[in-house]
Image (cartoon, helix red, strand yellow):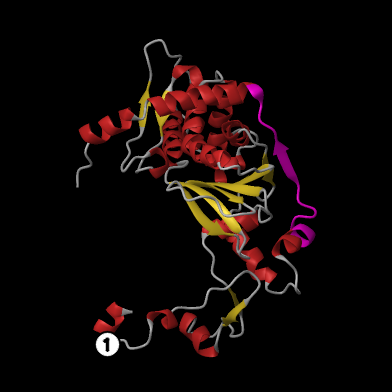
Amino acid sequence: DELCIEQGVESPFRKLLPNVLTAGEVAGELTAEGALLLDPSGNVQPGIRFCAPEGDAGTGMVATNAVRPRTGNVSVGTSIFAMIVVEDAVANHPEIDPVTTPDGSPVAMVHCNNGAQELSNWIGLFSEVALAFGKSKIDSIDDVYRAILTEALHGEADGGGLLTYNFVSGEPVAGLDAGRPLLARTPEANLTLANFMRVQLYSAFATLAMGMQILAKEGVEVEALYAHGGLFRTAGVAQRILAAALNTPVGIATSASEGGPWGMALLALFLNAEEEKLEDFLDGRIFNRAAVELKAPETRDVAGFNSYLERFRHGLPLEDAAVATMPIEN
């Protein structure tokens, strides 16, 4: 308000902002003037209803039907985050963000800056190797992921002694202001494609597991997590490793790769629901016939990931050294 007054704006700043709305409340309609502003040709018609705008956190909850207490979802992309719907607010932790479901229930969010980007970079490299060996072209990147990611299931449980960091940027959950992608190993480590792909997935989920362990100490319980994102197009691989990393059953719906945009569409559809709660609308109208595959963690994988995570935590000073000795050139 003080800054506005200095600039000659007399109205309180808060009055210039739109009201905060929850899911199901009407946020207005597209006016005739607005329709012409968007599309001077006149094809876009006025009267289209707006729904309350949502970020990818809220839309991810909706896309995975994780809006009831003790449910949660994991979104995997360039970044990765988990959101657990809690019954009471969680104590303040710098690693945990307090957010809400689109209809206002409290949510504890573990957000990690680094997700599947480094894994994607390696998949791109392996695609180049295939081309170098004479493959004329890559028909589908999904085929590449399927061929290479599946190898992770054949790796040693702890990744054969390999250590990778997927930090292309800083990672607050790990206490890092900056990051460098790294592969480190001792001479006796077993460097195979299967082990390498397994630790790449372990690395993608490691900081998420660290954040979830903080919530577990606060008594936050979750019965199952529902995941979405393009990484899950390769059936059964990332899902199995994520279940091990969080030691929690992980569900994947047939819509898992659709992500936030589909969740936004569902929220827009919810505007037409008559006095329904969001969770009842999703259960009764959207997910009542959805096929969801729930994968329980396997004991061998859980033990292997825990061994890797101990190695991951112990090696974090390598990141500090890499940042100090490998500055980014402007």
Q: Quadrant of residue 53?
A: bottom right
In the picture, measured across the screen, residue 200 lies left or right of residue 239, that is left
Crowd class of label 1 (few under 14; some 14 to 19; many from 20; radius 10 Å): few
Instruction: Identify which residue is drawn at 31% across, 28% down.
Output: 318
Instruction: Identify which residue is drawn at 43% across, 21% down.
Output: 162
Residue 132 in view, yes or no: no
In the picture, measured across the screen, residue 85 lies left or right of residue 78, that is right
Q: How many discs mark residues in the rendered view?
A: 1
Work out whether residue 112 or residue 141 is closer to the camera in this orientation and state it: 112
Dot 1 lies on which element?
loop
- The stretch drawn in magenta includes residue 75: no
Residue 296 in view, yes or no: yes
Instruction: Identify which residue is drawn at 46% across, 37% down.
Output: 207
317 over 112 or under it: above or below:
above
Image coords of residue 282 (percent x, y): 73, 60
Task: Give the residue type at disc 1.
Answer: Gly
Work out whether residue 103 or residue 325 is closer to the camera in this orientation and state it: 103
- The stretch drawn in magenta includes residue 287: yes
120 over 268 or under it: above or below:
above
Instruction: Identify which residue is drawn at 66% across, 56% down.
Output: 67
Q: Quadrant of residue 59?
A: bottom right
Image coords of residue 143 (percent x, y): 57, 36
In the picture, measured across the screen, residue 273 lies left or right of residue 188, that is right
Residue designated by label 1: 8
User: Which residue sits furthest top?
Assistant: 188
Where does the magenta region start and end? Answer: 283-299
Image coords of residue 202 (percent x, y): 50, 31
Image coords of residue 263 (percent x, y): 62, 60
